[in-house]
Image (tube, rainbow, N blue to C red):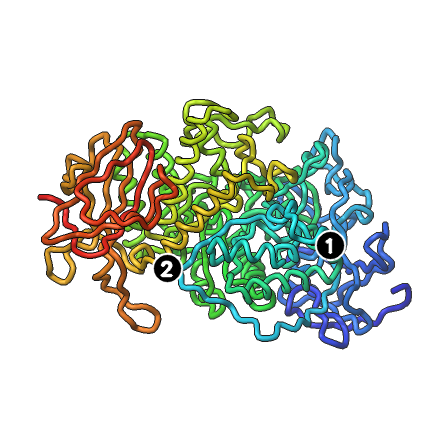
């Protein structure tokens, strides 16, 4: 590229760098820019571009040009000219090379240096000053992608929501220490698709992996100074490019490796859901660097305050994407469609999704973002999951998202944690969550699978730590233990942290079984955190976002106790798959079925009597649930009636044993114990004509009615 290049006008669409088999079209939205230069580098290691090409045309606010001599693999960036007037929200600085927002391949990562800022760091004028240094040696760079890939007969599994079991997992952390994954593949997309990794997922019984962010992200400078990284990846800069740090291959092959991972997981019947971060970018607030969006058109891409020098921050990360700008909506929609159509993913979990619903200030269920997705023939057909909160006013929106959306049910997490931690007066809340949270989702016309049920996720304690720590231990993050939440709703069993006390250890194991079983036996869509089934501990760190090390990586050197718990987890998953009443497509309400005296759902006290209004408001720690499964008024995908067993779930969060009296019945009832968390080896044990069952302290049991009908005592 050292010689004269031919430059043709090209087209304003599609945005980004597009190879058409003959040349490359470059198109960049920059409404307020006065000129755009395309900077071409001979290699990603070059400190300066070899040639600058002025994009010759501007059509509909898009600068564009076509280079018939350019080829896939060409490394490039942009310099964007325009006014530098921070008080008006304008921060153009052509001394800064900026990354194409539509980059499909990241050729070079950020190399932190003060020249990456549009203003002079340390100047008395702060961000109002102007920095004239060239950022080319340090800026992130893109490369042109050859998008051809042989997908073969790849098809999305299309697992029905009611049958979905989600496994939230970090690509690197899952296999970084896996002994059966080849060394060079550990911690990569290829590692996640390796036979050993896939077999674990299949043996566990999950149906979908939800990947923590895999879009290209930037490590914050303060983390780099601490020799840490943004391990979780919630600091996105490139919404079309797979993060190259999670690949075993380099350059353009990163995209191919991601596609091969998806193809392998699909072949095993596993869906791929991406955790995506469209609410903010890695550029931070007005004192952050100029890496991409800020230098291209700051006032278009970001929400600015009434005084436009400053950014509006609903995310806690310094900035918020401007959802009132049509080109920002286009960027997000183009990105989502790209990952579905070109990368074959099956759905998305939207980080801080409430921020995406803010057109002016308040969260709006009728926001353009939802309208566009609902009418989109591609995106309306994939799984859509919201994290239904942000950090702005009125940002907590659990239960308020529209149809087509499922939500991380924070109220489910809190109710289940509090109940098993011994919180009195929580049985009413717990009952609503066990039955699918109809109070949150039915009013909007949604089904039980609108509720993503979980007790642990990447953000917070792991399951092993939830029963071992009541206080966070985040010193390794470098913020003097100030980061991370203090509201954990956890219980350590009487001893904080590690212990050799066998009674405490047995209680903690039982609590882990309680929490895991509750998630898997509740109506709704269960989500498990990767490693919980293996006893993974972060040693009390409940905000391990920057710990790219053994704190976060799963340890596959399993003790006999860990293998026993893994076996228990697989058993409970099998129960869920075998029992249709646990995978209901419609809400349970406790109403009579087809005019009979039998209800679809019963709540009863330990004495076998149905719960009264007064009982719901008492400080109870024990509860029985009857799920009538042999008269489900539902059809499967092929129109066949769904029928299953009637189950009775017994829960005791008290420190004392509780004797549950069997509910009355019009005839002989034969019982079978499917599980008891106090006696994990008790599985599928016939109890026959059971009149009562003693439930140990802090435990739960699941009974199957082999024959007969169970009705609570009057």
Point 62% across, 29% down: residue: 476
Residue 80's disc is 1
**Are the residues tagged 1 and 2 within 8 Å (C-beta)?**
no
Query: Can you give x and y, in whole percent of width and height, for residue 72 in the image?
Result: 77, 67
| Viewer-closest of 354 and 649 | 649
Give the mark nearest the N terminus, 1 or 2. 1
Residue at x 33% of width, y 36% of height: 699
Q: Which mark is residue 365?
A: none
For label 1, the SS is strand
Residue 162 is marked as: 2
Question: Residue at left 23%, top 30%?
Answer: 619
At mark 2, the secondary structure is: helix
**In this image, 24 relative to 258: left or right?**
right
147 versus 302 height, above or below? below
Q: Residues within 10 Å of mark 1 (few under 14, many from 20)?
A: many
Quarter of the rendering containing residue 304:
top right
Q: Is residue 186 left or right of residue 278?
A: right
**Mark 2 nearby-residue class (10 Å; few <14, some 14–19, many ≥20):** many
Q: Nearer the viewer, residue 36 or 579?
A: 579
Q: CA–CA distance between discs 1 and 2? A: 49 Å
């Amino acid at each position: 590229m050292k010689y004269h290049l031919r430059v043709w006008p090209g087209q304003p669409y599609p945005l980004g760098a597009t190879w058409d088999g003959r040349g490359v079209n470059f198109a960049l939205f920059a409404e307020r820019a006065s000129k755009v230069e395309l900077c071409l580098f001979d290699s990603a290691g070059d400190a300066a571009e070899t040639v600058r090409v002025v994009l010759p045309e501007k059509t509909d606010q898009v600068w564009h040009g076509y280079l018939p001599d350019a080829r896939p693999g060409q490394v490039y960036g942009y310099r964007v000219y325009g006014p530098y007037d921070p008080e008006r929200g304008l921060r153009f600085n052509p001394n800064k090379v900026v990354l194409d927002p539509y980059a499909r391949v990241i050729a070079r990562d950020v190399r932190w240096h003060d020249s990456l800022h549009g203003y002079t760091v340390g100047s008395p004028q702060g961000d109002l000053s102007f920095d004239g240094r060239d950022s080319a040696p340090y800026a992130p760079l893109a490369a042109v992608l050859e998008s051809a890939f042989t997908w073969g007969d790849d098809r999305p599994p299309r697992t029905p929501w009611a049958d979905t079991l989600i496994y939230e997992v970090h690509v690197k952390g899952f296999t970084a220490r896996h002994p059966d994954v080849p060394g060079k593949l550990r911690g990569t997309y290829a590692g996640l698709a390796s036979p050993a990794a896939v077999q674990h997922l299949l043996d566990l019984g999950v149906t979908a992996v939800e990947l923590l962010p895999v879009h290209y992200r930037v490590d914050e400078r303060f983390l780099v100074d601490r020799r840490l990284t943004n391990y979780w990846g919630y600091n996105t800069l490139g919404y079309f490019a797979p993060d190259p740090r999670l690949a075993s291959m380099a350059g353009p092959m990163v995209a191919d490796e991601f596609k091969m991972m998806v193809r392998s997981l699909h072949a095993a019947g596993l869906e791929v859901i991406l955790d995506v971060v469209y609410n903010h970018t890695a550029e931070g607030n007005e004192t952050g660097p100029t890496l991409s969006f800020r230098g291209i058109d700051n006032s278009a891409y970001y929400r600015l305050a009434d005084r436009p020098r400053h950014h509006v921050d609903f995310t806690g990360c310094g900035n918020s994407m401007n959802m009132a700008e049509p080109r920002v909506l286009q960027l997000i929609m183009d990105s989502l469609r790209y990952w579905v159509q070109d990368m074959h993913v099956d759905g998305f979990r939207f980080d801080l999704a409430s921020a995406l619903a803010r057109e002016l200030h308040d969260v709006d269920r009728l926001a353009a973002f939802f309208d566009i997705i609902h009418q989109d023939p591609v995106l309306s057909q994939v799984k859509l999951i919201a994290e239904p909160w942000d950090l702005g006013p009125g940002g907590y929106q659990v239960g308020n998202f529209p149809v087509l959306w499922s939500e991380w049910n924070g109220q489910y997490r809190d109710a289940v944690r509090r109940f098993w931690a011994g919180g009195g007066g929580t049985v009413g809340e717990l009952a609503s969550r066990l039955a699918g949270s109809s109070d949150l989702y039915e009013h909007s016309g949604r089904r039980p699978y609108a509720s993503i049920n979980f007790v642990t996720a990447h953000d917070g304690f792991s399951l092993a730590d939830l029963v071992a720590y009541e206080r966070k231990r985040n010193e390794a993050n470098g913020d003097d233990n100030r980061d991370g939440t203090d509201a954990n709703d956890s219980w350590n069993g009487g001893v904080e942290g590690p212990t050799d006390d066998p009674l405490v250890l047995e209680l903690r194991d039982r609590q882990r079984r309680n929490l895991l079983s509750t998630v898997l036996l509740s109506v709704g869509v269960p989500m498990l955190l990767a490693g919980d089934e293996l006893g993974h501990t972060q040693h009390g760190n409940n905000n391990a976002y920057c710990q790219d090390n053994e704190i976060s990586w799963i340890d596959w050197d399993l003790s006999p106790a860990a293998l026993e718990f893994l076996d228990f987890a697989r058993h409970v998953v099998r129960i869920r798959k075998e029992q249709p009443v646990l995978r209901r497509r419609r809400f349970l309400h406790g109403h009579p079925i087809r005019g009979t005296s039998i209800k679809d759902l019963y709540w009863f006290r330990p004495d076998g009597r149905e719960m009264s209004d007064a009982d719901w408001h008492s400080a109870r720690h024990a509860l029985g649930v009857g799920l009538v499964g042999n008269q489900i008024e539902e059809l499967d995908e092929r129109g066949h009636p769904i029928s299953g067993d009637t189950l009775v779930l017994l829960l005791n969060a008290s420190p004392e044993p509780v004797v549950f009296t069997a509910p009355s019945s019009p005839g002989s009832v034969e019982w079978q114990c499917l599980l008891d968390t106090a006696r994990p080896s008790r599985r599928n044990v016939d109890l026959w004509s059971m009149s009562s069952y003693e439930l140990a302290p802090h435990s739960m049991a699941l009974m199957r009615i082999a024959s007969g009908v169970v009705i609570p005592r009057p």
